[in-house]
Image: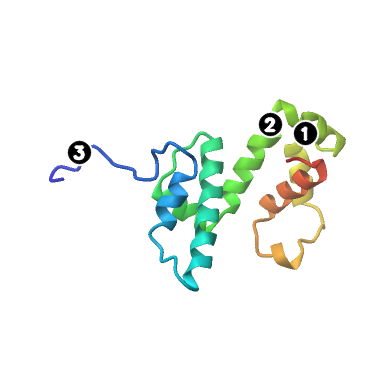
């Protein structure tokens, strides 16, 4: 490709027939024998979760996004939960949980004195608050 400005770009993880293909393409580069098999399986699951979330949000899967969200999943988690909270089919559950205005409820939790448990203490507080709303509403 001598002329990148006029060449077609190829995104090996952005075009797929099944949502599991990007995860398979990435995990397939890792060794699968012995102790490496567990890490390969973890990688496949992690990349598959990121791929599903990006696709649900209407975003194209790229290596850059996989690297970005692989290193820090909280922004993607927050975007995905906001996407779910805005769906009409979840409004009754959010109302029952006292979060009919989920953005206001989110800000209240973020600014409250509630403590994150040790497992989530280093995570983004806003993402943690969104997961609290998700859990209290019993969403699936």
Q: Mark 2 = which residue?
A: 86
Circles 3 and 1, Cβ within 8 Å, touching? The answer is no
Return the x and y of residue 105 as percentages of the image width and height: 78, 41
Q: Mark 1 = which residue?
A: 101
Circles 2 and 1, Cβ within 8 Å, touching? The answer is no
Q: Is residue 77 left or right of residue 128?
A: left
- Position above or below: 67 against 104: below
* Viewer-nearest residue: 32 or 60: 32
* Viewer-nearest residue: 108 or 116: 116
* Viewer-nearest residue: 131 or 27: 27
Identify the mark nearer the N-term, 3 or 2. 3
Tell me the element at label 1.
loop
Number of numbered labels in the structure image: 3
Q: Which residue is at a point 52% across and 41% down the rendered structure image?
A: 54
How far apart are the two marked residues, 3 and 1, measured between alpha carbons? 47 Å
Return the x and y of residue 30 as percentages of the image width and height: 41, 63
Q: Which residue is at a point 41% across and 66% down the rendered structure image?
A: 31
Q: Which residue is at a point 41% across and 45% down the rendered structure image?
A: 62
Q: Mark 3 = which residue?
A: 7
Q: Nearer the viewer, mark 2 or mark 1?
A: 2
- Classify mark 1: residues with Cα within 10 Å, few (<14), some (14-19) or many (20+): few
Tell me the element at label 2.
loop
């Amino acid at each position: 490709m001598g002329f990148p400005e006029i060449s077609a770009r190829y995104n090996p993880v952005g075009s797929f027939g099944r949502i599991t293909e990007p995860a398979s393409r990435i995990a397939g580069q890792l060794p699968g024998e012995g102790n490496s098999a567990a890490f390969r399986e973890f990688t496949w699951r992690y990349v598959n979760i990121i791929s599903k979330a990006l696709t649900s949000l209407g975003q194209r899967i790229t290596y850059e996004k996989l690297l970005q969200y692989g290193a820090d999943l909280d922004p993607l988690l927050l975007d995905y939960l906001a996407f779910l909270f805005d769906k009409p089919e979840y409004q009754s559950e959010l109302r029952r949980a006292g979060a009919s205005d989920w953005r206001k409820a989110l800000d209240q939790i973020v600014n409250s004195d509630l403590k994150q448990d040790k497992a989530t203490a280093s995570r983004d507080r806003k993402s943690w608050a969104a997961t609290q709303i998700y859990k209290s509403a019993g969403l699936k």
